Image: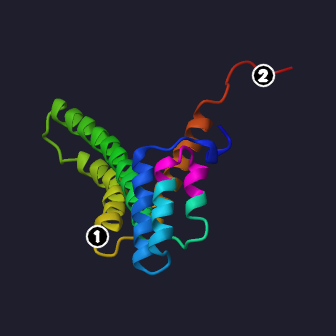
Amino acid sequence: MSDLSRLRVADADREQLIEELREHAGAGRLTSEELEERIGGAYAASTRADLDALRVDLPVSSTSVKLALSKRRVQLRRRLLQEAGGSLGVSALCVGIWLASGPSSGFWPGWVIGFTLLPVVRDAWRLFGPASDLDVVQARLQARHERHLARGRRHHRYRGLPRP
């Protein structure tokens, strides 16, 4: 569906709008009559366009900003955990090979563990640390994802007979 305004809304969407409207009423942007009218409209709304029409003349509320930030943080946390899982899988495989070959030499899987987990640890610090920077984490994750896709395209080229 190309027109997102025609998507149907859920009760959670209505409740979020009502919370935003109450915040605006508390800030003095809406009178109590306007608040009641818009709350009624929120309960009657069936599409995203209906909800958007109720907030069209209001600035973005801090509630919606916090919700968007929270959703973004959850999405980045999920992507970071996926990368950590891949890194841990490769590291565990290397440790298994090291153990199977007889751990008489130095612990060479430490190099693999360091190189595969270093970017994940760095981004986790940026995401969960005291100076959280979601833009940097998202940019690094996206860059690694694009490099991975480019590597995949490079390795899956057709290598059959030359075309005439």
Q: Residue at x 32, y 45 (%)?
A: 87
Please state which of residues 140 and 156 is positioned toward the viewer in this rendering: 140
Per the image, label 2 sits on a secondary structure element best described as loop
Neighbor class of circle 1 (other Cα within 10 Å; few <14, some 14-19, many 20+) is: few
Identify which amino acid the numbered label 2 is placed on: Pro
Residue at mark 2 to residue at mark 1: CA–CA distance: 53 Å
Q: Is residue 27 left or right of residue 104?
A: right
Q: Is residue 110 left or right of residue 73?
A: left
Q: Which residue is mark 2?
A: 162
Q: Quadrant of the C terminus?
A: top right
The prevailing secondary structure element of the residues shown in magenta is helix
Please state which of residues 119 and 132 is positioned toward the viewer in this rendering: 132
Could you say which quadrant of the image residue 120 lies in? Answer: bottom left
Is residue 161 at all visible to an observer of this figure?
A: yes
User: According to the image, what is the colour scheme of the structure?
Assistant: rainbow
Q: Position of residue 76 (x, y in %)?
A: 40, 55
Q: Which residues are magenta?
A: 42-52
Q: Which residue is mark 1?
A: 129
